[in-house]
Amino acid sequence: MRRIRVVSVATAVATYCLIVLGSTVRVTNSGMGCPGWPLCSGKYGPIHRFGPLMEQSHRYLATIVTILIFTTALLVWRAGRDASYLRWPAGLSVGAILVQVVLGAVTVIAKNAGWTVAAHLLVAMLFLAVVTVTAVGSFLGSEQSWMRPHRVARRAWGAVGGLFLIIVSGSLVVDGGAESVCRSWLVCSGSQASQSLITLQLVHRGVVIIGATLVSTYLVSILRSASAQRSQRVFAVLGLCLLGLQVIVGIFNSALGAPAGIADLHLAVATALWVVVVALSDMADGAPVASTVASATLARVGQADHR
């Protein structure tokens, strides 16, 4: 289980970095830096230009994530009954990464068509959710897994669903070219853009309000819960801070016309918030990660003293 924990956490971290790097490739228009696939113009590297360097670096990191995914699945399978409850998320992550590889190839072949880029990002978010569940679940017992019903399940699902819709609508805004059409907040006054782009931006803002309400309600409910453990409260506070930062970055992103750096930060913060909310939903009815690790450590010390 120790190896599973280390590899699964490394997988979640690497997947997060992969999504952020993919966002950088996207906002810097480096997606077609390598017109071929899987190699960059038939070469492994080094790449001396920015666009090809970013695109090929993204592919190399995707290869590392793929290796970590298969390693995690293999370790879970070899662990037998001790990790039987992790088999379905570990197996699902293998399927998800294969879908991502295919979508990556299709995106290049389709020359970064909007729908392929959006699908690539959304599947990446679902993939990140699965590896997060695997990582958190590796610190929890089978009786504490997220599949067990608990009182806050509806709020947890509401927060996860609301945040996912925010990411979906944000992706549609980017692919539709509506990032910089409304520089005022909350309404879109004085814009000279087409009505369709304005409507797309306003729909996204409406989804943000609804989704942020669902997420904040869930996080506050954890803080107000008398049974919440310290690690859960820490995650909840972190989530609220990330949510506030995300709103601020979103306002600046619109006001400044969606410059590449802020647009990249916008997705990076949203992805971090996604990880926190998914992790909390997994921990909702189980022992907190820190407590589980501490208990396991004390048990080993006790066994050593007994011997």
Image (spheres, rainbow, N blue to C red):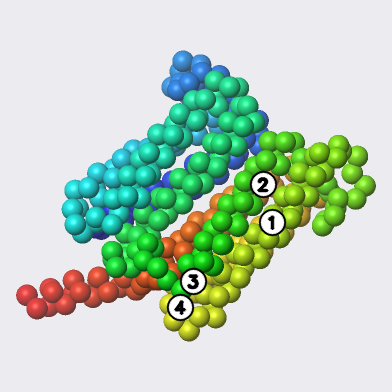
Q: Please rate how many residues cluster around mark 3, counting C-alpha atoms within 10 Å: few if below 14, some from 14 to 19, many from 20.
A: some
Earlier residue among tags 1 and 2: 2
Question: Which of label 4 and label 3 is nearer to you?
Answer: 3
Q: Amino acid at mark 1?
A: Val
The answer to which quarter of the image holds residue 160 is: bottom right
* Residue under numbered circle 2: 169
Q: CA distance from mark 4 to mark 3?
A: 11 Å
Q: Please provide percent x and percent y for residue 207.
A: 69, 54
* Residue under numbered circle 1: 208
Q: CA distance from mark 4 to mark 1?
A: 27 Å
Q: Amino acid at mark 2?
A: Ser
Q: Which mark is residue 245?
A: none
**Dot 1 lies on which element?**
helix
Vertical order, 171 against 219 (above or below): above
Q: Please rate how many residues cluster around mark 4, counting C-alpha atoms within 10 Å: few if below 14, some from 14 to 19, many from 20.
A: some
Q: CA distance from mark 3 to mark 2?
A: 26 Å
The answer to which quarter of the image holds residue 132 is: bottom left
The answer to which quarter of the image holds residue 258 is: top right
Q: Which mark is residue 228?
A: 4
* Residue under numbered circle 3: 152
Vertical order, 267 against 305 (above or below): above
